[in-house]
Amino acid sequence: MSIEIDAGDIIAGFALILSAYATWQTVTFNKKQKSLVESQEKLNNLLLEKEKSESDSAKQAELGANFIKVGPNKTRLKVWNKGPALAREVMVEFPEGNDIVIASELTEKLPMEVLEKHQAVEFIAAPHMQSRRKYTLKLIWRDERPEINEKVVYLTL
């Protein structure tokens, strides 16, 4: 029994090899395409998170405070808003006690109804020889976010 191989068998063999190669290439391409789709989805999610955080940051005020010298014997406590949103109902508290800012300054100016972007308010400070060198200041305010915001600032003279 002899096996005869004719031209049709050779062509069929090449067709089988070519078909197997095409199938392998398709599987490889589909794997690459799937990983590309997954990375595109991750990128889209990151972009959505970034847009959401930028949108949230546009809704928040960012308060800060510091002591400033305005003359040889004149000191002020300056509270400012450097965030893009309005700060409403601004309050200033000294958790460890206040012996530097004049009490009438705080009661007359606070609560501050609105502190706009890049706006500041100053309070007269009266440091003396027994004044501490470091103060803890608690800033409390509302902005476009639903919760009340608090920030603790440590100030030094």
Image (cartoon, rainbow, N blue to C red):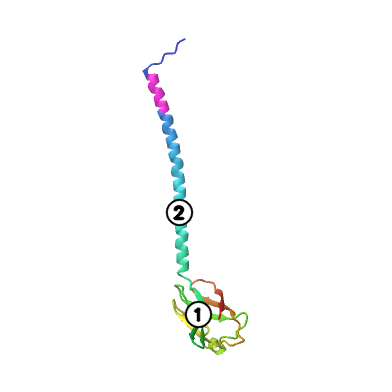
State the residue position of label 1.
79
**Residue type at tag 2:** Leu
Q: Position of residue 113 (x, y in %)?
A: 49, 82
Magenta span has 37? no
State which tag comes first along the sequence, 2 or 1: 2
Judged by its main secondary structure, the magenta piece is helix
Quarter of the image where one finds residue 100: bottom right
Count of numbered circles in the view: 2
Image point (38%, 22%), residue name: 11
Categorize mark 2 by other alpha carbons within 10 Å: few (<14), some (14-19), many (20+): few
Nearest the viewer among 147 and 92 is 92
Q: Quadrant of the C terminus?
A: bottom right
Q: Position of residue 154 (x, y in %)?
A: 57, 76
Q: Which mark is residue 43?
A: 2
Q: Position of residue 93 (x, y in %)?
A: 58, 81
- What's the magenta region? 8-17
Q: Which mark is residue 144?
A: none
Image point (52%, 78%), residue name: 65
**Residue type at tag 1:** Val
